[in-house]
Image (cartoon, rainbow, N blue to C red):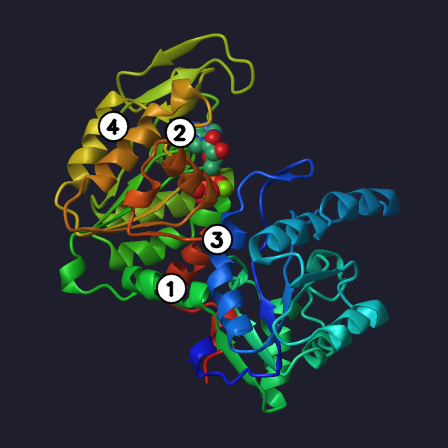
Amino acid sequence: MKTIKDLNVKGKRVLVRVDFNVPRKGETITDDNRIVSALPTIKYLLDKGAAVILFSHLGKIKHKLTAEEVDAAKKKNNMVVVSKRLSELLGADKVSFSPDSSGESARKFVEMLQPGEVLLLQNTRYEKGEEKNDLSLATEWASYADAFVMDAFGSAHRAHASTYGVPEVLKAQGKDVAVGFLVEKEIDALSRCVDVTDNNRPYVAILGGFKVSDKIKVIESLLKKCDKILIGGAMAYTFQKALGVEVGISPVEVDQLDYAKKCYEQAKGRIVLPIDSVYTDKFEGWTEKGVSETASIPVGYEGMDIGLKTQALFTKELAGAKMVFWNGPMGVFEQTEFAAGTKAVAQAIVELEGAFTVIGGGDSAAAAAEFGFKDKFSHVSTGGGASLEMIENDGHLPGIDIIKE
Ligand code: ADP
Ligand code: MG
């Protein structure tokens, strides 16, 4: 696979798909990590004399909005806030912003761009053809550039026009496509979690968080690779329920019960579930809190975190691990009352000696940062969904496969 070091970009226009989907409160960017993570690629291209065009999505897409709601969403997810931060990081004289993501006005910005300068396009999310990987949209974007660089690892599991269509069109035209430094680093780290060698064993995966239906599919793949899978967070209740354990009003993915049971049986003891829980009478505005003695949660109550016994069990299961992949908090760590389980697991991971440790998940990374452990992990992925899909698909992601020759 080509990386940007293989490209000759002097005097050329290079289109870079970045992941600038940053968290914000109002007009303020609360964590600019994704922008900062793209700087090595951007600076390298500028140093080599390229004119750099950046494009990214920003914000969650909600379908079926009224015209008014679309306007409000566009305003809320205007990429201009990112362009301001980028100007601060690179110098205002170097950065320009196109308020449109395509069309004549965007093309004018592209044509004015000089080597050594950066142009950021408007949010790609509101282009109708983006998610459909529409050929005419991809062809238009491709026409802006002499080469394409994929540096949006967090979007590499999507075959959209900006991640897949553009490199496909440029390749067909005989132009260069390559991965950037960030994607290269992600592939290096996550490949180790996919192509496991004996040096990496025991290999323990820890799954948690809330997005059960997105994540549960990865378990079958992980069972083929890992020695143990520890499951906490909301996902644990789907497993408990499938095994006939009382889970009260805890979140359960009803249509995944059979799958969960099948995985558990296939694993033959390699899936480890919580043996106690911290629970409350409800999720929002709870007033009663308790800790269960066993895996089962009292009728009418909801599990919010793993208990002390589970913390000890998971710490014991992690002991001696040579590789750990962690996705998803063990509890509702945003509230201090339910942060202990996540903190204990994070601590147990970072205290492992000589282990290769990876976080793949935005909230898990946020939790690790909050507890002061983030720098102690070997790799913190910028793509939660993408890192899971890479494991699930045995190293393949559409946005990366299309770059390969
Ligand atoms: P990641 O971003 O690391 O992939 P997710 O997005 O899947 O993780 O899930 C993170 C969320 O899961 C957190 O906001 C956390 O509060 C929530 N969560 C964890 N455990 C529970 C639980 N038992 N009940 C409800 N929510 C939970
Ligand atoms: Mg998340």
Amino acid residing under circle 3: Gly
The residue wearing badge 4 is 310
Residue 53 showing in the rendered view = yes
The residue wearing badge 1 is 185
All told, the count of numbered labels is 4
- Residue closest to the eye, 368 or 190: 368
- Residue closest to the eye, 2 or 196: 2
Q: How far is disc 2 from disc 1 in space, using C-alphas?
A: 29 Å
Disc 3: residue Cβ within 8 A of ligand 1's nearest atom: yes
The residue wearing badge 2 is 331
Residue 65 showing in the rendered view = no
Label 3 vs 1, first from the N-terminus? 1
The residue wearing badge 3 is 385
Label 1 vs 4, first from the N-terminus? 1
Amino acid residing under circle 4: Thr
Do labels 2 and 1 touch, CB within 8 Å? no
Amino acid residing under circle 1: Lys
Give the image quarter of residue 86: bottom right
